[in-house]
């Protein structure tokens, strides 16, 4: 069992018996924020619409098992993963909720593992459907395996062409051992303020469903929406939404934030970031004017400068391209990072806080006092998206769960 200790700064840490070393750097997962986000998302959904928590890529770096269990308690009813091993990890942790594998299987071995672990596969091609049916027959699988047919309505990634939906459905329904549980598609531009392409994809999805129904079959479950479509338009919710990013407390784009204007037809949600990245100061010293800092001397002190060394680097997921372009929070105050970020350590200009101490906590992402630094801030500096920032934190950083209030 985990037990928790409150420190004077209000942060809870696992007691040393659980986390033996005093970590130099770690990721905090705010379970109360996660539960809050699930409830916020549920508030947008019709009661019969299910919420699939997308927990691929170790729950966007947050820890798949922890996130899956918490999201299920708070109101999600399905889980989505990218790969078979990701699904197995959840089953091995005792999770019994339905799990969709978003990446379609191409080998009998993958199908065997899917069947054994009660995962539900995506099928994108007739070939995949045949491999699935043949493998299940060879296994003498006791009952039909639920499968989700994926249609390509404009993402040009996985999925059968939407124009072939009815034929694909016919083929799958004629195969033994497969139960056609769902038909779904994925949107390419749901986070764009211009909804034109999303509407076209929506129309194609509708047309595909109509063609399937014209052949006398109604799919038991339809799903289309990612976070942006969930936040943006109730017409895209269907029977289930597949939310990743919003679960983790980030908005897919600025126009989904409270107070923004743009295409969403739904009231904005108040989402709370779940993940924080923290590290400790490992050394404090003053360097003389003219002294270079870190590899390549990308920073040279223009005066005698108090600096702090922090025990986190690019091997932990702090992008090296943020070198000299990021600030961190200490005691609620912004402090500039200086010189190249190295593999395991980085340096700060602490002239604003000359009495900082070894062991003090530095917030790289997260909130401290009244200020906060978000994955969106890093993403905009790096010209990338917050999804990539979140997934970038490596396993060297322990994930420390902050339980928060225990109301479900
Ligand atoms: C990753 C993924 C999602 C979740 O996307 P978010 O934008 O993070 O909500 C939904 N559906 C599919 C098919 C995905 O691959």
Image (spheres, rainbow, N blue to C red):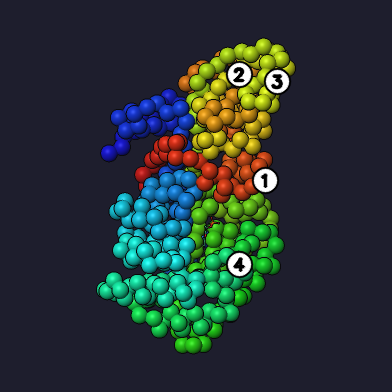
Q: In what element is the residue under mark 2? A: strand
Choose the circle earlier in sequence order: 3 or 2: 3
In front of the other: 299 or 267: 299
Q: Is mark 2 within 8 Å of ligand 1?
A: no
Kindly report which numbered mark, 4 or 1, lies closer to the viewer in this rendering.
Answer: 4
Q: Which residue in the structure is indicated by mark 2?
A: 307
Residue visible at 67% across and 67% down in the picture: 197
Tag 2 near tag 4, CB within 8 Å: no
Q: Which residue in the structure is indicated by mark 4?
A: 156
Choose the circle earlier in sequence order: 3 or 1: 3
Choose the circle earlier in sequence order: 4 or 1: 4
Q: In what element is the residue under mark 1? A: loop
* Dot 2 alpha-carbon crowd within 10 angstroms: few under 14, some 14 to 19, many 20 or more: many
Tag 4 near tag 1, CB within 8 Å: no
Q: CA distance from mark 4 to mark 1?
A: 23 Å
- Residue 78 in sight from this viewpoint: no
Q: Which mark is residue 383?
A: 1
In front of the other: 305 or 275: 305
| Image quarter in which the N terminus is found | top left
């Amino acid at each position: 069992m985990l037990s928790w200790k409150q420190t004077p700064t209000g942060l809870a840490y696992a007691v040393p018996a659980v986390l033996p070393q005093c970590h130099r750097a770690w990721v905090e997962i705010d379970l109360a924020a996660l539960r809050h986000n699930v409830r916020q998302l549920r508030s947008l959904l019709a009661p019969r619409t299910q919420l699939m928590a997308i927990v691929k890529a170790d729950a966007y770096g947050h820890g798949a098992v922890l996130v899956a269990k918490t999201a299920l308690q708070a109101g999600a009813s399905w889980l989505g993963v990218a790969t078979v091993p990701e699904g197995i990890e959840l089953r091995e942790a005792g999770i019994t909720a339905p799990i969709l594998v978003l990446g379609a299987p191409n080998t009998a071995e993958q199908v065997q593992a899917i069947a054994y672990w009660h995962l539900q596969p995506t099928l994108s091609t007739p070939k995949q459907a045949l491999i699935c049916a043949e493998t299940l027959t060879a296994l003498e699988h006791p009952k039909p395996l639920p499968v989700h047919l994926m249609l390509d309505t404009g993402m040009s990634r996985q999925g059968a062409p939407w124009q072939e939906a009815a034929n694909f459905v016919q083929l799958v329904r004629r195969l033994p051992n497969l139960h056609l549980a769902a038909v779904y598609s994925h949107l390419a531009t749901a986070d764009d303020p211009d909804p034109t392409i999303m509407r076209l994809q929506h129309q194609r999805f509708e047309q595909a469903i109509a063609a399937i129904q014209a052949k006398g079959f109604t799919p038991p479950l339809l799903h289309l929406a990612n976070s942006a479509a969930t936040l943006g338009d109730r017409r895209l919710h269907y029977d289930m939404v597949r939310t990743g990013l919003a679960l983790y407390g980030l908005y897919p784009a600025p126009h989904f934030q409270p107070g923004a204007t743009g295409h969403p037809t739904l009231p904005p949600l108040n989402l709370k970031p779940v993940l924080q990245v923290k590290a400790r100061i490992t050394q404090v010293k003053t360097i003389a004017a003219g002294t270079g800092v870190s590899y390549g001397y990308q920073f040279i002190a223009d005066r005698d400068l108090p600096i702090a060394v922090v025990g986190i680097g690019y091997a932990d997921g702090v992008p090296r391209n943020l070198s000299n372009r990021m600030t961190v929070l200490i005691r609620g105050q912004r402090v500039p990072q200086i010189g190249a970020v190295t593999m395991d350590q980085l340096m700060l200009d602490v002239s604003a806080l000359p009495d900082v101490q070894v062991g003090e906590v530095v917030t790289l992402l997260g909130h401290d006092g009244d200020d906060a630094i978000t994955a969106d801030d890093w993403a905009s500096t790096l010209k990338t998206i917050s999804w990539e920032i979140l997934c970038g934190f490596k396993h060297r950083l322990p994930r420390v769960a902050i339980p928060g209030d225990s109301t479900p």
